[in-house]
Amino acid sequence: MKAGAAFSAALLLAGCSPVQIAAQPETATVKPAAQPAISGRDHQSPLDRIAIDYILLTLAMGEKEAGYVDAYYGPEIWQEQAKQDGRSLAELGQDITRLIARTKALSGDRNRARQRFLLAQLEAARTRHAMLSGKTLPFVEEAKGLFGVSPAIRPLTEFDPVLAKIDRLVPGEGDLAARVEAFEDQYIIPKERLKTVFDTAIAECKRRTEKYFDLPSDENFRMEFVTGKSWSGYNYYQGKYQSLIQINTDLPIRISRAVDLGCHEGYPGHHVYNMLLEENLANQLGWKEFSVYPLYSPQSLIAEGSANYGIRLAFPGHERLQYERDVLYPLAGLNPEGAQDYWALQNAKDALSGARITIAQQYLDGEISREQAAQLIRKYQLVSADRARQLLDFNDQYRSYVINYGLGQDMVREWIEAQGDAPVWRWKAMERLLSEPMLPQDLQNGLDEVTSGY
């Protein structure tokens, strides 16, 4: 990384964070979690040993719930051990509680930010474990337990002025969602041109990111087009600076999604985020807990929020319009004369992101039926009936995870843009965000108050 060497030195030399974590020492009656035979374990620090137990516990949880582990690139033997792990779900819950107590007891550990990160991840594991054990939590409580923030639920009527503004942008009369759909359907990328358009867009996202980040020379990704998913794109990080990026083609893909997904899943989004964690924390500092990524954790708010904000960071202002109009429209065989109007509509729709959280809360808390939720999604997200059903399928599968996109982006944007107006300062802030043991509360409280030392 351009700031990599200085960053690592700063981590190694810095003092402790001023934030205090209450100590809860273990007593002699607490049964220790099951331990594997790990070479050199006796010579590791207490926090290193906790990190290893956290990894093993996360992998074991992943055996209880498909998709719980979003990425893992640590020793294969630990993954194999997780497959043979004999702990019941109840025993895993007990071990989560013990590991939290051990982590809290390390009040004197100088790597306070690392300790805080592990504790937050474990608290999320305890919430997810409760859900897997059959406990149903209210949407806001679930979101707080899993992702570390309590989302504000805004009344849907707050978004009516946004709809009124969009109504003036879209030609025709009648149902606004139907008019928006008809208008946007003029900008669908033909399937035979998808690969060319996406390859080109991702390459441009990478080029813009490389201006500020010194990416590993051997980094790369593989792209696949898939069907039968509740999401539009997904990054499966493989470790060693490699990713598998999948793009869902169940529904028509419009031209704006090329840059969206190229930045979000690739550069400077998920692919870069995972690479920086692997290079700076897992490899350079030996913080092995960053070799595993549990999906239902505060880490996801940082990941999704930074990936969404990364789109604006890489293509600020009118640069995105100019690039799509001059490069991607011709590749897709679309008429660039309408690029300005389509771009203006996408910008206006961004202000509706909060409505997605409100509808998800009402639906998941049982306040509205699935049919009512689909109708509200059509109205306040301005999508087709098919896409509304896909968004509902996402809610069914991932539940409160939805907060990480809109709320996460808002939190990341506010923190990064407070660092300065110049592009170089915003990219430096982005690099710091992606390279440190960041938590959502750090963005809320002012990062320097919390992670000033390691």
Image (spheres, helix red, strand yellow):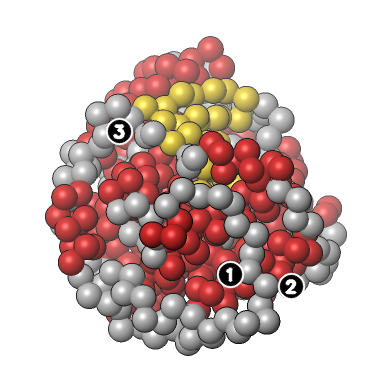
Determine crowd level at label 3: few under 14, some 14-19, many 20+ residues with C-alpha closer than 10 A: many
Marked residue nearer the N-terminal end (1 or 2): 1
What x and y, as percent, mark residue 270? 43, 43
Depth check: give the residue in front, 172 or 282: 282
Marked residue nearer the N-terminal end (3 or 1): 1
In the picture, which quadrant includes the N terminus? top left
State the mark number for residue 254. Answer: none
* Residue type pointed to by label 1: Leu
Q: Are marks 1 and 2 in contact (CB under 8 Å)?
A: no
State the mark number for residue 206. Answer: 3
Q: Is residue 7 left or right of residue 205?
A: left
State the mark number for residue 138. Answer: 2
* Residue type pointed to by label 3: Lys
Q: Nearer the viewer, mark 3 or mark 1?
A: 1
Marked residue nearer the N-terminal end (3 or 2): 2
Q: Secondary structure at mark 2?
A: loop
